[in-house]
Amino acid sequence: MALAGSLGVWPGPGGDSIRQPERLCASSYCPPTIPGPVTDWPWSDTTHYFNLDPARVQLVNLNGSVVWTVPMRATQEPDLVGKGDFNGDGIPDYIFGQLWTTSPVQYCAGKPMSETQLVFVDGATGRWSTPVAPLLDICWEQYGYPTHQWGGGTAYIGHFLNGTTANQVVLFPYYATEGWVLSFDGTLGWSQVSRTADVLAYPSTPAFDVAYNSSNGTACLTIPYANHCYAKWSHVANGIFVGTAASPGLLVLTSYRAVIYRPDFTPTSDVVWSYDEGGGRDYGLLESHDVAGGKMVTLIGGCSVAKTHDTMRTHQLSEDNCELFHHYEYFLVQGNSIVQHSGRFFGWFGTVGRWQDRAEFPFPSDVPLTGGALWSVFNLYRDGQWRAQLLPNPADPASTVEVPGWYVWGAVTDRSGRVMLAATRTAATASTDVASYIPPWQFDLLMWSGKGLISARSGRRFRPSPGFWSKRPMASSRT
């Protein structure tokens, strides 16, 4: 790994930084701030948002005052890649991804290639650094496009090393062969950390099989149609920190596999599953919550409700695939072990297209809908209509409560503590024209009561689809 970069600060007016709420979103399709009273609710005087353009990133208050400005050298709008406190001052810091066209221009299948770079920003001051060298796109000549290497899913800020209370930054390029851990010191700056190994062996080369088998009592699990564990060109990581303060870990999902990295950098407790299509991609919202049996982690393989919010504003369908591989996964993690897994496959873009079986999630997607245990909640588009998907037992996706004709934006709590879903009523259509995908500009508040959703406004009950309690075979399970 090459450490490189520069350091600078561009102070802006109104320099008092205010602690922001944490959001457990590990997806490029769920930015930490989605402007709007429904998708980023509630707003308050402490709410910040970003102004992004190729020349700069600004942190801005709701009144328009600028907290700080960071210069960019990008040729398109930068992406927010990571959020968390990497310098220990208690204020969220940020990692942005920027890209620029190579000079001189290099081409992949006739398309200009880019270099990408991560920019680390102190959330309190706007001081920025680039401790990691830029990476050139990988060219897929046979498929006709290049792939950027630093972007969403490549940087994670959290507590990974035991024996310290500080956070670290874990990095995996988009098509990684290995990952690295960086630590920040206010005096010394950035340094690369090593433990049992210098790097994290990614499940894309034989080095992963060696690292796993040499550090565990049982061998790693082979992928479908192969006699080895690694999957060449495993896709970008989708990760979230698990474990405890004394024994932290990082759960990573990639092609066909979930695996936990221990603080000594060794991989353990892998789970492998196979669906009929899709190559095992695991993009989407990865969310975790503490529960009685450990830590519950759910994946909704889709995109944010912000995508539909955009289609409502433009009245044009999103060209985004909303992830190619539409599925739901549940994991129960105890310490550094995955002790339970279940999942459900909905569809793959290559077979059903961009919209059929499309999943879109609110944030958070796990809510105490009946005031106690968490339910998983998201939206699924099928056969001309949006359908709310409610999982009273997130560990059993085969028993989903499906309520057709509703699109859920998020959850709110009234003064009595009741949890309600902010949702929009959608009509069923005989065709799949634009109108069938785009909800109207109105919404209701829905409560769960008995065997259906009840409108807080009208008192009308909306029942689930017939036979919604009937079991369907789960795609995979492990206990």
Image (cartoon, rainbow, N blue to C red):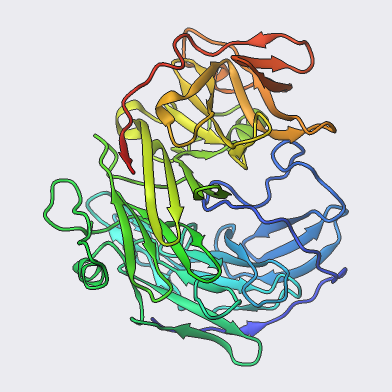
Point out residue 255 in the picture as x, y percentages from the top left corner: 31, 51
- In the image, taking residue 466 as reference, residue 477 lies left or right, namely left
Q: Residue furthest front?
A: 292
Q: How many labels, in total?
A: 0
Quadrant occupied by the C terminus = top left
Quadrant occupied by the N terminus = bottom left
- In the image, taking residue 351 as reference, residue 377 lies left or right, namely right
Residue found 43% across the figure and 73% down from its top: 263
Quarter where residue 202 is shown: bottom left
Point out residue 25 in the picture as x, y percentages from the top left corner: 57, 51
- In the image, taking residue 209 as reference, residue 76 lies left or right, namely right
- In the image, taking residue 68 as reference, residue 254 lies left or right, namely left
Point out residue 389 in the picture as x, y percentages from the top left corner: 52, 26
Q: Is residue 453 above or below residue 272?
A: above
Residue found 72% across the figure and 71% down from its top: 90
Q: Is residue 329 visible to us here?
A: yes
Residue found 25% across the figure and 55% down from its top: 141
Q: Is residue 44 above or below residue 214?
A: above
Q: Say which of 1 and 435 sits in front.
A: 1
Q: Say which of 197 and 114 sits in front.
A: 197
Q: Residue furthest left?
A: 227
Q: Say which of 385 and 248 sits in front.
A: 248
Point out residue 295 in the picture as x, y percentages from the top left corner: 51, 52
Q: Is residue 369 above or below residue 285?
A: above
